[in-house]
Amino acid sequence: MNELVNFTTKKLVERDENLEDMLLSMKKEIEKLKGELTIYKAALSNKMLSSRPKQQVMNVSKPEKSMDKKRGRNTIGIWEEFQRELKKQFYP
C-alpha cells in the first residue's frame, strides 16, 4: 500500500512540474506578445502602418475634344467618365 502511495505521489509531482514548466513557457510567450502589441500600437498611433496607401493628387489636364476628333481618336465623352474609368484601373 505504501508503494502505491509513493508511486502516486511521484506521478503527481511530475505532473505538477510539467504544468509549472508549461505555465512559465506560456507566461514568456504572453510577455513577448505584449511587447509586440505595444510596438504595433505605437506604429499605428504614428500612422506608420496603414491598410491602404494615402491618395496622391495628380494634376491631369482635361483632354481637348476637338483636337482628338480631328485626329480621329476614340475619346471619352465627358471628363467625369474619364476619371471613373481611370480610377477603376487603380482602385478595386
Image (cartoon, rainbow, N blue to C red):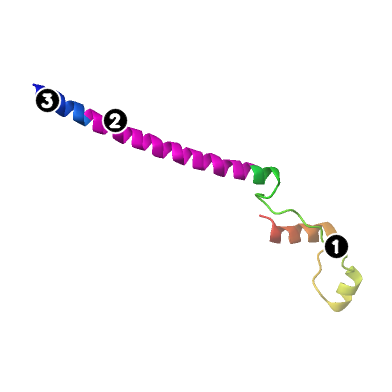
**SS assignment at label 3:** helix
Circles 2 and 1: CB atoms closer than 8 Å: no
The circle drawn on residue 16 is 2
Q: Which badge, 3 or 2, is on the more N-terminal residue?
A: 3
Task: From the top left corner, tell me how far across and down residue 37 is, in percent.
Answer: 57, 41
Report the residue marked by disc 1. 59
Q: As drawn, is 31 to the left or to the right of 10?
A: right
What distance separates the C-alpha of mark 3 from that of mark 1?
Answer: 86 Å
Toward the viewer: 49 or 13?
A: 13
The structure residue drawn at horizontal position 20% and vertical position 26%, both measured from the top left corner, is: 9
The structure residue drawn at horizontal position 68% and vertical position 50%, both measured from the top left corner, is: 48
The structure residue drawn at horizontal position 82% and vertical position 61%, both measured from the top left corner, is: 58
Q: In the picture shown, does residue 46 fall above or below 5?
A: below
**SS assignment at label 1:** loop
Task: From the top left corner, tell me how far across and down residue 5 is, in percent.
Answer: 14, 23
The magenta region covers 12-41
The circle drawn on residue 4 is 3
What distance separates the C-alpha of mark 2 from that of mark 1?
Answer: 70 Å
In the rendered image, which quarter is residue 45 located in?
top right
**SS assignment at label 2:** helix
